[in-house]
Image (cartoon, helix red, strand yellow):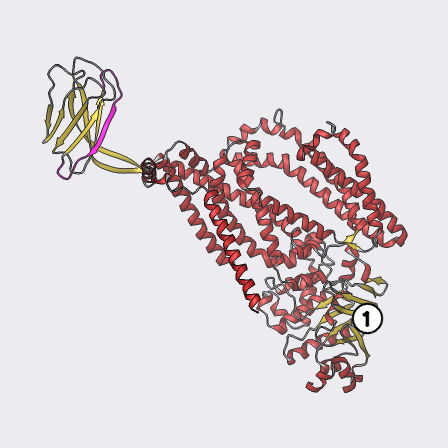
Amino acid sequence: MKNQNGNKWWRQAALIAAVLVVYIYAVQATQINLEEPLKPRRQENLIGLIRELAHPDLFAFENETRSTNISIRMPCPEEIKGSQVTAEGRVATLAPNCATTTQDLLQLSGEGFKPNGRIVVFWHPVGSTSVRRLTDTKADAEGKFVTQFTMPDIRETADPQRIEIVEVIDRRIIGLSDTSNEALQKIVETVLMALLASTFGTLLAIPLSFIAARNLMESIKVPLAATMLAIILTPVLAGGGWILVSRLTTPLVNTDSGVLLSIKDSFLTFGFVGNFIYVLLFFLFLLLLPLLAALVGLIVAVVLGNRYGQEAMMRMSDGTARGVTAVLTFLGSAILFLLIALFISWLNVLGVSQFLPETTTGRVQMLLLPAGVVGAVGAILSLRRDPKRPFAIGFIIYTLTRGIFNAIRSIEPIMMAFVFVVWVGLGPFAGIMALTLHSLADLGKLFSEEVENIAEGPLEAITATGANFVQQISYAVIPQIFRQYIAYIFYRWDINVRMSTIIGFVGGGGIGFVLQRNINQTLYTKASVMVIAIAIVVGVLDYLSAQIRDRII
Amino acid sequence: MLRVKNLTKVYEDGTVALDNVSFEVPDGQFVAIIGLSGSGKSTLLRCINRLIEPTSGEIWWNDVKLSHISGEELRRARRKIGMIFQHFNLVDRSSVLTNVLSGRLGYVNPIASILKRFPPEDIERAYANLERVGIRDKAHNRADELSGGQRQRVGIARALMQEPELILADEPVASLDPALAHSIMRHLQQINQEDNITVLCSLHFLDLVQQYSTRAIALNKGQLVFDGRPEEIDDERFAEIYGREAERIG
């Protein structure tokens, strides 16, 4: 007993010591430095920055001003004097009233100016239409001021030159500043970017979420031969569908001679609606139709493989079934290996393509033997199992889909945006694509977890009626998850607005792009406006999405 | 005719839910399955329509080897086997009518059904079946607005939509009060006698077994311990099925 306690004491002490060491090292590793922030230069910079940020360039002002002119000589005559002017009760004194070098200090004082008013001193150099700002100051409560300055430049003339003392008598807001207008325009762009990304992400995530839900997929089991038949048919039918349809649509969307491109201008005469239709048609022909053809090919392959493969299996004697399964497994695993290997070599993962021939045919020839070996191994493994026993293909698809979702989710959207900027150029379109991809993976995971949380009873009951997979989803699953999905879409929109501000930093468009530019150009009063705009929109969306979620669920 | 041969189910955690169970059910029987909670009644019923995968053994429905089919063939077999559940298993957020119509999913055109389109004769049949169980007026209510007894009637109507040859009822009255229990059991009896549908029904209460069933099968720890007429279950048999402990309490 005593021994045990002693043991415990040492363990705790060792644990505390270990934790302490981690913290002590962390201070060094993170370069915590208390001297630097104490330096006066740093503090001045900080105060300057914070003051600028605290002074956002929100409004456009109109100043009502009053001028008092006093003259200056350059260079100084032999006898140096001061000069004084009086105008409507205001007295301004300049001493000395001349400058020979840019080092000569001049003192300007005044009385009878607007109490507490802002005063800016300008010089009108002879022979120049522009004015030079010399200094600015503020009158005290009695309307007096004293300020000192040097001339930035010496223009020697015989006649005296004019110095203008400008008082701001009144200052009125006449509307939003250009910065605010830009912020407004860009924040709308950002919100719309997030909206499109959330919509596209949702549309893609919904069907995928069902095949990433364990409770739906686990029960999908078909004989191995049927699975392999589907794998063999997929590249032929899906690939064939893609190639066939894209051959047909290429003449329409070709960037050199595309029919659609040549009539783009007539679309654009209808303004943004015309542009929408143009983009829609382009998307339809370029991607959607070939993709649909590939999808139909995939479905046909799966249905054919599933239905006929399965029925054939059941009719065959055990020996025949085993043989057919082995042959199909040989072909199926060889084809799968070949496709994956070709993809890896095309991607040049870890630089593998330097060991492979240049052309695709060369690569296929080289990979045939390994594919044969993989196929043979697959076939031998397939012989070890009962050919009529269902094979849990559903679980494999579930695991793969979930894995892909998690992999995509773990890639920073900023990295995705960077990749898409390279592909589609700077601007919000790249941002939309990056956010769509991230939303797809994120929503796919959230949605599929929602599917996994449904009450199993209704699903069991619908399955028992003989409903197929799609019917099970539409009758037992969708009624149970519909509201949660809607809530998640709004939640994702909210997140996407926040993310799109970050994505702008790498050129993904939206307000982040402007914010980054302002920061780089040290225009902090403008940057401040962008920050305020983001804060307002994020706050409002956060509130709205919480409200909508509360109301729906 | 339902034939169960050497059926065994071992769950992944090692629990033996069914241990070499064999029996035959000629068409038209009303078979009660009795036994303690956890004796394997639900597992047996779910193995028959393959909501649970048997570990070994065979199940035949006429000349279809239910235990070994999959995919399309399994769906075609399932649509002839109606199922009724203890917790009704209705889709709460859908209407009563939709719940009943979902019994037709094994028959209708899959694409039309996804768009919630059913042939007019199916809709008529749905109303007729709701009429038969006495809740036609609830057709357009949401399923979760109904009381327990009404919900189980929806469950029966859904099973009837399948035009079943066999009905599996998994403790259909265990969540209902005694009065409702008798009304639900009478519906099942009527279906069994009028439509000549074979019924396999797991039950807890012996008086229900003796009142409604024509045959009783008892399971204890996954093994078949009794197969005979319900009235043969005397005190001695009861003790064998439920254990000595239960005898004193009951």
Side of A474 where A127 appears, left or right: left
Magenta span: chief secondary structure: loop
Rendering coords of residue A67 (x, y %) = 18, 28
Q: Is residue A126 magenta?
A: yes
Rendering coords of residue B161 (x, y %) = 71, 65
Which residue is more in the foreground, B20 or A454?
Answer: B20
Rendering coords of residue A302 (x, y %) = 75, 47
Side of A537 where A59 appears, left or right: left
In the displayed structure, A40 sits above or below A480; it is: above
Label 1: which residue? B21
In the displayed structure, A275 sits above or below B130; it is: above
Please identify the quarter of the rendering in which residue B103 is found: bottom right
Q: Check disc 1 and give the amino acid type.
A: Val
Residue at coordinates 14% horizontally, 36% vertically from top-left? Answer: A143
Side of A135 where A25 appears, left or right: right
Label count reads: 1
Q: Give the magenta-colored segment's residue range.
A: A125-143
Q: Residues within 10 Å of mark 1 (few under 14, many from 20)?
A: some
Q: Secondary structure at mark 1?
A: strand
Which residue is more in the foreground, A256 or A529?
Answer: A529
Quadrant, the N terminus of chain A = bottom right
Please state the chain letter of the residue tagged with numbered disc 1 in the rendered image: B
